[in-house]
């Protein structure tokens, strides 16, 4: 079974303005909609669209959970959140306009997780976890959460000997690297922190990876996202670069999460690295063409696959 874990889920308030967003001007709203927010929730939507059964879990505030669960149900995603009384679901804001230059993401902090919340979550929502399962921790807990609490959660997963995928950053990513991890998806800045040297291009990533293999020995697969430059897939046996085709960007929010759902789908279904990377890259590009912050058109991603450029490096 696959479980996504979003430790700070959100409802995205997507606001589209008529003209390009400009300071000092009255930026008239042409459309407002709510969508699923928080990274692991997006991965669950992506996996569900790809036909991969999964359970969308996490810890969220009691107030407003029904909005988030309803939004997930619209994508046929099965949700099982641990809800904390007296807390509310986080509201994030995604501003888009017709400039085609991407979105502005304005996010709330959310609330600090405690040891008790983690223990209750594991007891109530991850009870049937077994060693062949995959747990995808995607999105950081609120930054008010102590690293000890996050580390406790990780250690409990390691004890259950599950396959762990993590898309987290900052001190949470450092914590993840202390454990045996199946896949991480850092961006180039997070990867620079991991290896302790600046990386600006796919070539920089590859040479830095080769110089720092010992530091990264716990991680089986790494996909470094490099924005428009695409991504670099790094593992002991295989190294590839993938570059997305040019698309008209409507809302790039959630493209990285959609990409991750494609990576996971390919790797867990024993696709070749080429096919996995092409699938994931086309999905990320298809997502950017959508107005909402989650979901993508499978048909459109199939159309885009032939235009994904990839290179086998090692
Ligand atoms: O990756 C997209 C997204 O999940 C948005 O939907 C928005 O909710 C934001 O990222 C949440 O990011 P955060 O790092 O605050 O959990």
Image: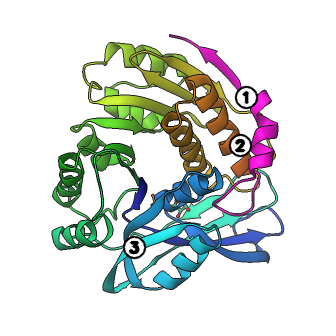
Where's residue 176, x and y in %?
A: 27, 43
| Measured Cα–Cα span from mark 1 to mark 2 | 9 Å
State whether residue 92 is above or below residue 215.
below
Task: Mark yes or no: residue 230 visible.
Answer: no
Give the image quarter of residue 132.
Answer: top left
State whether residue 273 is above or below residue 116.
above
The residue that appears at 23% across and 39% down in the rendered structure is 179
The residue that appears at 32% across and 69% down in the rendered structure is 125
Report whether the residue tagged 3 is closer than 8 Å to ligand 1.
no
Q: Residues within 10 Å of mark 1 (few under 14, many from 20)?
A: some
Q: Secondary structure at mark 2?
A: helix
Check if mark 1's residue and mark 3's residue have beta carbons within 8 Å. no
The residue that appears at 25% across and 19% down in the rendered structure is 214
Check if mark 1's residue and mark 2's residue have beta carbons within 8 Å. yes
Residue nearest the viewer, comparing 51 with 232: 51
| Measured Cα–Cα span from mark 3 to mark 2 | 29 Å
- Closer to viewer: mark 1 or mark 3: 3
Picture disc at residue 111: none
Q: Looking at the image, is mark 1 or mark 2 earlier in the sequence?
A: 2
In reply to whether residue 293 is colored magenta, the answer given is: yes
Residue nearest the viewer, comparing 169 with 39: 39
- Closer to viewer: mark 3 or mark 2: 3
Q: Looking at the image, is mark 1 or mark 3 earlier in the sequence?
A: 3
The residue that label 3 is drawn on is 81
State whether residue 167 is above or below residue 270.
below
Picture disc at residue 308: 1
Picture disc at residue 285: 2
Where's residue 40, x and y in %?
A: 47, 57
The residue that appears at 50% across and 17% down in the rendered structure is 239
């Amino acid at each position: 079974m696959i479980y996504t874990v979003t430790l700070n889920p959100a409802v995205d308030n997507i606001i589209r303005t008529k003209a390009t967003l400009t300071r000092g001007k009255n930026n008239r709203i042409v459309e407002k909609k709510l969508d699923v927010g928080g990274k692991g929730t997006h991965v669950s939507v992506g996996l569900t669209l790809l036909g991969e059964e999964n359970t969308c879990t996490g810890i969220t505030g009691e107030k407003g959970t029904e909005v988030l669960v309803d939004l997930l149900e619209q994508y046929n995603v099965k949700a099982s959140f641990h809800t904390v009384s007296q807390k509310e679901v986080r509201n994030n804001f995604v501003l888009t306009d017709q400039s085609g230059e991407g979105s502005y993401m304005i996010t709330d902090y959310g609330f600090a997780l405690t040891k008790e919340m983690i223990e209750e979550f594991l007891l109530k929502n991850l009870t049937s976890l077994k060693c062949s399962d995959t747990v995808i921790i995607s999105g950081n807990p609120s930054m008010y959460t102590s690293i000890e609490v996050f580390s406790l959660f990780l250690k409990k997963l390691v004890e259950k000997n599950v396959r762990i995928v993590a898309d987290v950053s900052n001190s949470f990513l450092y914590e993840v690297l202390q454990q045996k991890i199946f896949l991480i998806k850092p961006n180039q800045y997070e990867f620079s922190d991991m290896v302790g040297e600046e990386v600006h291009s796919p070539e920089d990533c590859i040479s830095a990876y080769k110089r720092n293999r010992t530091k990264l020995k716990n991680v089986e697969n790494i996909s470094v996202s490099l924005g428009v430059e695409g991504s670099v897939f790094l593992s002991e046996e295989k190294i590839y670069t993938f570059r997305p085709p040019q698309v008209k960007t409507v809302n790039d929010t959630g493209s990285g999460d959609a990409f991750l759902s494609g990576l996971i789908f390919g790797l867990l279904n024993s696709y070749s690295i080429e096919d996995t990377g092409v699938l994931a890259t086309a999905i990320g590009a298809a997502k950017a063409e959508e107005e909402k912050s989650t979901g993508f058109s499978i048909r459109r991603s199939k159309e885009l696959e032939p235009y994904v450029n990839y290179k086998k490096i090692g």
